[in-house]
Image (tube, rainbow, N blue to C red):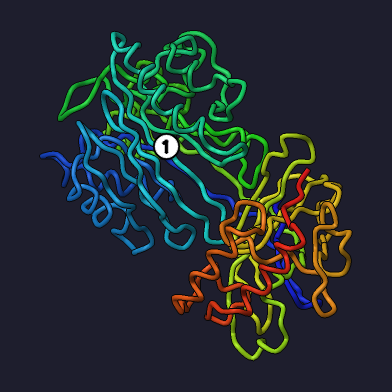
Amino acid sequence: MKYFFTLVFSFNFFLPLYSQQQIKIMTYNLLNYPNTDTNIRNPYFRTIINSTSPDLLIVSEINTLSGVNSFLTNVMNYNSSIYSAGIYINGFDTDNAIFYKTSKFNFISNTVIPTLLRDINEFKVVNKSYGDTLRIYAVHLRAGDTSIVRRGGEVDSLRKRTNQLPTGTNFIVLGDFNIYGSTEPAYQKLIQDNAGDDGNFNDPLIMTGTWNNTIYDSYHTQSTRTRSFGDGATGGLDDRFDMILYSNGVKNDGGLKYVPGSLTPFGNDGNHYNDSINQIPNTAVSQTIANALHYASDHLPVYSIFEFGNATAVNIKVIPEGLYNSSLNRMNRKDSVSFYTRKIITPYNKVDSFKAVIDSFTFNASTVSRIANSGTYYIQINHRNSIETWSRFGGELFTEGITFNYNFTDSESKAFGNNLILRESKFCIYSGDVNQDGAIDASDLSIIDNDAFNFITGFVNSDLNGDNFVDASDALIADNNASAFVTKIVP
């Protein structure tokens, strides 16, 4: 479940509810693309993409930028221009790439995680409807049963990155893992839940032992063919190399959830163990699609369905002290406020965060948050030159389906430690913490005085009242609060 958060100064503001949105994320080893037979294989790839229609497609064994552009033009957008490609980085050996539906996602970045072998790519995208950020780690681990140690080393590089992510982060890993079973070190390192970090992955399937086994024939992804032609491995379907695993944040419904039972090795009907995928009959797909899978690549594409949850209206009222000045409201002063929800038990881990823009005409700002479950939380507010402020008890109740309202402005008791100041008729969060060290003191006054002496103007942290000038009016606010020894008060 999601909550739709609004930071407002006005008292009547209505926000709509949002329905759930399902997305299909697919991984596909394209088998050395492009190659001399690319023009022959493109129609087969088109058949597969038309049949699956993934919202996000992450591919491996794509070798050049021209190959990415070719696949985008001649496969993904052959019938209509609904996909874009993320930034491509040419690394050692074969590479990974991402394609996404522009109606559903914005691409943010491609960050390389170097290993001693192939690069791992962190693709970061944002869902347009909900504003959730999703990190996708694309891997193509070292192949061969003699490379067990090397695959483990590659996963070590991945876990170093994911272990550093905040608790509850939404991320998945997918691609061609070349892993042969559940006891392999690389697999164990992926799923190992270590104390002190939240960087492990969850496998939606429970498959113990060696995966090259008839009891797992419905989940094998390589090879689609039994005879040699062009390029690629033979031997028929008998290995589960291609997987999609997800973080604890996804498992725990932290704004994005895996739809149980949705993991699908496309085209595998469970009846082609050690056989080619297009051997008649294939009860999972049509013969046309089975032939396309056979001739396009030696791997099957694998997809899972993930779901962004409902959004529920939440209204929060908060005012930075320096901005609450009725004489300046004729100016359209814009600023941003960061909002966090935190667990009520030490160490008060962050559950969600967003940054919203406010302006002095409407004082309304909205975005989408991802509180997953009903419960009680602390509300934390951060503003660029104000004191960090938390809600009173950590007992602020979020109930699914019921609009949540919280007003920092009507009583000083609404803040933890009563850490608010009365300005005109409203309680505000203290302004003056220019250097964001949690205290308003001489160091902040020094910054303001220096900027005023140098006639600094514009959107700077030392401009407390938002009039685009650093002057005595800003210094007065900070000086009063410094004299009162104002500091942040948190649990």
Q: Is residue 321 left or right of residue 189?
A: right
Position of 404 relative to 470 (above/below)? above
Determine the secondary structure under disc 1. Answer: strand
> On screen, 393 above or below 84?
above
Residue 141: where, in percent of width, then height?
Answer: 33, 24
Q: Position of residue 484 (x, y in %)?
A: 77, 61
Q: Is residue 238 visible in this depiction of the protein?
A: no
Numbered marks: total: 1
**Image position of 428 (left or right of 103):** right
Q: Residue at x 60, y 79 (%)?
A: 472
Crowding at label 1, few (<14), some or many (≥20) Cα neighbours within 10 Å?
many
**Residue 161 on image: x %, y %:** 44, 32
Quadrant for residue 74, please give it: bottom left
In-front residue for pair 217/232:
232
Residue 184 rendering spot, x and y as whole percentages: 44, 11
Question: What amino acid type is highlighted by mark number 1?
Answer: Tyr
Is residue 95 visible to the viewer in this orientation of the structure? yes
What residue lies at 67% left-to-right and 54% top-to-bottom?
439
Depth order, front residue of 127/415: 415
| As drawn, 123 above or below 428 | above
Rendered-image quadrant of the C terminus:
top right
Q: Image point 22% across, 26% down: which residue?
A: 232
The residue labelled by disc 1 is: 137
For residue 222, above or below residue 433: above
